[in-house]
Amino acid sequence: MRFIDLAATSVAVTATSGRRAKVELLAATLRDLAPAEVPAGAGYLAGELRQRQTGVGWASLRDLPPPAAEPTLTVIEVDALVDEIADVRGSGSQARRRSLLGRLFAAATADEQRMLVGLFSGELRQGAQSGLLAEAVARAAGVPVADVRRALLLAGDLRTVAVAALTGGAGALAGFSLRVGRPLAPMLAQSAPSVDAALASTGTPAVVDVKLDGIRVQVHRSGSEIAVFTRSLDDITARVPEVVAAVRALPAREIVLDGEAIGLDETGRPLPFQQTSSRAARRATAGRSSAADGDADPARTGDATRTGGAARTRDSGQTGDPDLAGDAVEAGDPDLAPADRVDLAEVGPSPADEPGTGSHAAGAAQVAPAVRSAATSTGTTVLTPYFFDLLHLDGEDLIDRPARERWSALAAAVDPALLVGRLTVEDPEQAGLAFAAAIDAGQEGVVVKAPDAPYEAGRRGASWIKVKPRHTLDLVVLAVEWGSGRRKGWLSNLHLGARDPHGGDFVMLGKTFKGLTDEMLRWQTERFLALAVEHGDWVVRVHPEQVVEVAFDGVQTSSRYPGGMALRFARVLRYRTDKSAAEADTVDTVRAIHAGRPTA
């Protein structure tokens, strides 16, 4: 297939508003792909390169050759050239990479160049999300979409599933199962403004878990082989020796755990999220324990940060690690009778010497011995895992089992020091007390869970609902203003934008410099100068890709901004290196908050 045909499909999908019409366009193109073209072609339609790390960032995409007048590229040729670019190593690699990139773009027409820029940057905005691609693959292959979705969740890779569906049909899709050593997309939590609203979704009785602020980890063990993955399925095994040690000390032969890792200092006190993520972003000195079957994707290792399928390297200005922040942080023992359960004010990592907040799962003396030993051996900050779900145990997949059964197996298989307590509640009053206790203990909030629900891998379903004590949004930085006074010389005031899911652009909602520490100011100055697309004397406009989590007191009507709304008292909580701009909150969510409607 010619690459221009894929580019034409991308243009057509962008211009089409109806979901069914988008699916038909994508399916028709998928049917026309030759078997050898499916891995790359299906990825291109999903906005992803088959090669997850290419060494190409925004700096490399700023000065491109003029487009070709006539299309000559094929899908196979593009894939081969990207392979060459991704394989460049050693002395002179930057010049060699730029030369190959120039060769590729010189052979591409204007529409092909637009698609290539989107693929390399991970921001191909054509309205073809993974859900639409799953439907399109099913339509093209003539198989039930449910079969494709399940295979996609278990395989964690659209290209692999597309090849199976288009070449082997339903029979090939049925062959996918949870494989120890191969990560699967984690289950995520929706949001609700209150525990009452959360319970309206999950029903009662429900389980209330403390929401911690760490990094999401999925740990696979088979015998002595252990691998640790982030929410975006990147392999960070070598960076978290304490997590490896904790799981190695468990009695299970084969196990797949879902949880959260947080930083603890020498006394066992929890560290702020910034320090936890920084600790995990550094490579550990200990050797890596490989995945169970040695089949962990090598492209998932390394230091580049992936967003939307494309790795960012130094010339994009990206720092930190992919997807380190957790989405739903919870764990615990599901089988304690209500009278035996600990107070949520005593749950989870909290200062061991703070009155009323000591915990069986925290404090220097309570950290699992294997974790403490591993941390001591590396001489770095303690990073302790707290597990909240169990997906596989000694040859048996548990993802389709009700949550209460998974949690029961978890409690029997995992050291209690590695579990955060949880409460079963029967009504909103009990849930409200649990929420208040968690907040009083200094935690982020709670996650309310339906105890009968299966593990919905890769989905943000209605059976996990997170509740925080304030409005928060993940927004995109559109521009930054130079600071004055003490902040002179640093980029300070952030222009904040919400994603427009209909037009594909961003809607500005206001500015803030509140909540920025000196460390954050130094980091963001370097970061946004690298992302700059326009340098002014006062304002630096940047490519809209950096996501920042902000807290605010409400949304007010404002004629100052195009969306007619502005955030009240916005303040920065943290930068989200784990999210791409395509995952930022939408202007529809902001409008719902403005109108006083639930946003879950």
Image (cartoon, helix red, strand yellow):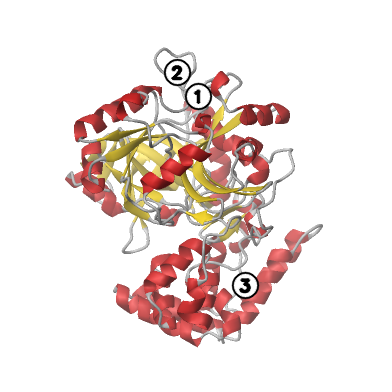
Which label's residue is closer to the chain start, 3 or 2?
Answer: 3
Residue neighbourhood size for the residue with mark 3, other residues' Cα within 10 Å, grouped as few (<14), some (14–19), many (≥20):
some
Q: CA distance from mark 3 to mark 2?
A: 62 Å
Q: CA distance from mark 1 to mark 3?
A: 57 Å
Q: Is residue 125 visible?
A: no
**Secondary structure found at label 1:** loop
Amino acid type of the residue tagged 2 in the rendering: Gly
Picture coordinates of residue 216, whole percent (x, y): 50, 43
Residue neighbourhood size for the residue with mark 2, other residues' Cα within 10 Å, grouped as few (<14), some (14–19), many (≥20):
many
Count of marks overlaid on the render:
3
Residue that mark 3 sits on = 65
Residue that mark 1 sits on = 362
Depth check, mark 1 against mark 3: the one in front is: 1
**Secondary structure found at label 2:** loop
Which label's residue is closer to the chain start, 1 or 3?
Answer: 3
Q: Considering depth in this image, is 447 or 285 the residue closer to the camera?
A: 447
**127 w.r.t. 442: above or below:** below
- The disc placed on residue 358 is 2
Picture coordinates of residue 263, whole percent (x, y): 55, 30
In the displayed structure, does residue 429 sit left or right of residue 391? left
Q: Is residue 108 visible?
A: yes
Q: CA distance from mark 2 to mark 1?
A: 7 Å
Amino acid type of the residue tagged 1 in the rendering: Ala
Which residue corresponds to the image point at 60% horizontal and 40% vertical from the top-left?
251
**Secondary structure found at label 3:** loop
Picture coordinates of residue 294, whole percent (x, y): 69, 57
In the displayed structure, does residue 337 sit left or right of residue 597? right
